Image: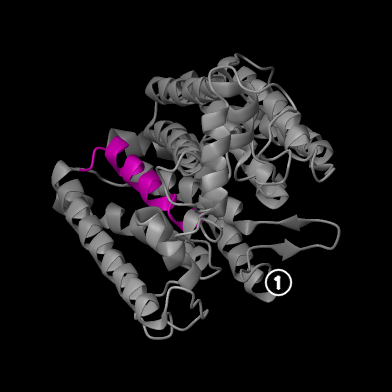
Amino acid sequence: MDQQVEISEAINDPRAQTKPLQAVPRLDWINPLAMLCLGVISTIFIYSAQAYSQGTHWKMQIVWFCLGFVAYLVVSLTDYRFLLRYAHYLYGAGIIMLLLVFFGPEVYGSKRWIDFGKFKIQPTEAAKIGALVLSASILARSEIGSVRESLKGIAKVTGCFLLPMFLIFLQPDLGSALVFPPMVFSLLYVAKVPVRFFVGALVALLAFVAVIGSDVYGYYQYRKEKGASSDDQGSYEDRSLIPLKDYQRKRILSFIAPEVADPRGVGSNWNRNQALIAVGSGGLSGKGYGKGLQAGLGYLPPAVAHNDFLFAVIAEESGFVGGAFALILYGVILWNSLRIASMAQDRFGALLAVGVAVLLMVHVFINVGMTIGVTPITGLPLPFLSYGGSFLLSCCILMGLVQSVYRFRKDFR
């Protein structure tokens, strides 16, 4: 009850609207410095990754970093409690943008972009931010106690995440859809939802995995009947009740049983195998900058070397030392974001900081995992390293939210 009163006062306090115009009272330098280091590493190795194809994405990466820094400053100088009033509008804008992609261009069988001519934006990133802010707002206002008392808040948050997940899944973009569950469960955990709920959720998750596993096994049997060389797109997906594309089933099968999905390693396993060779051949200190062979000779395709598989380029050219340094920087961001969450004086600020930390770290875990063969290939980019304007801007905005929680944490009364 006290929490709700405090939040209501924060929303209606006119001083909250004037805070962003005041002089900067305090800054956290840890996250910005880690972001800057990752930005420098990104530019350097994108240039190296594209040496084979003579690409110039490294120049655009610098431009996106500059725009991202401006966005970071704007968000960090704005009191995060300002979002309590406008969370629904932010969420609604993200949903509308997700709907607009279905009227946009289709690229490689997916509709994920809104085309503005000279540039494109990926609405998925805006939807992630909107879902995070609205969910944190809902939980900050909701009564959390027993499972029965918490059901209303849990239902609202679940619906908040399911809608964008469904729309992203339809694009189809399975990888981006998978980042939502860890984020929502982390928010519910921080909000102190009873453990019984998580036990039930775990049972449901196991059942879901069993259903997907059964479907993929059916796909494997179908391919076996048709012949290993048969790859008729849409042939099995038209028969299955599970709304997966055949190429998504093939990716999952490639992860579970690569020798079955692609026995010669020249199909769906090609990128994975080349990334493993790159990481393994880097050794302790790497082959040297610009001397990597997998991306340098085009074995790691130019289309993915500078974005989804940039970590493989870093590991090959700078070795275990360079790869570990990048992971340490991510560890610093995670630790510091959670530290800021623990310093927050209100539930909304703590939820925002934790949600940001979990969202970014899920990207890191899945991306690095698919590079070293421990997670399926999903196409998730690496925060602040992989090339991509929309994703880089969203990462900077998310870090700006964490900075805002740090700056305005003691102003909550």
Question: What element does badge 1 sit on?
Answer: loop
The residue at 50%/41% (across/down) is 363
Q: Magenta region: which residues?
A: 176-193
Picture quadrant of residue 219 = bottom left
The residue at 60%/31% (across/down) is 400
Q: Residue furthest front?
A: 264
The residue at 78%/34% (across/down) is 47
Badge 1 crowding class, 10 Å Cα cut-off, few under 14, some 14 to 19, many 20 or more, is some
| Residue under pointer 1 | 104
Q: Which residue occupies the foreground of this view, 112 or 150?
A: 112
Q: Position of residue 352 (x, y in %)?
A: 46, 36
Residue 170 relative to residue 208: left or right: right
Let me know if residue 373 is in the magenta part: no
Q: Position of residue 362 (x, y in %)?
A: 44, 41
Picture quadrant of residue 388 = top right
Query: Quick check: can you spot residue 201?
Result: yes
Q: Amino acid at mark 1?
A: Gly
Q: Is residue 398 above or below residue 207?
A: above
Residue 385 relative to residue 261: left or right: right
Residue 204 relative to residue 266: left or right: left
Q: Is residue 235 above or below residue 306?
A: below
The residue at 60%/66% (across/down) is 96
Q: Position of residue 334 (x, y in %)?
A: 46, 26
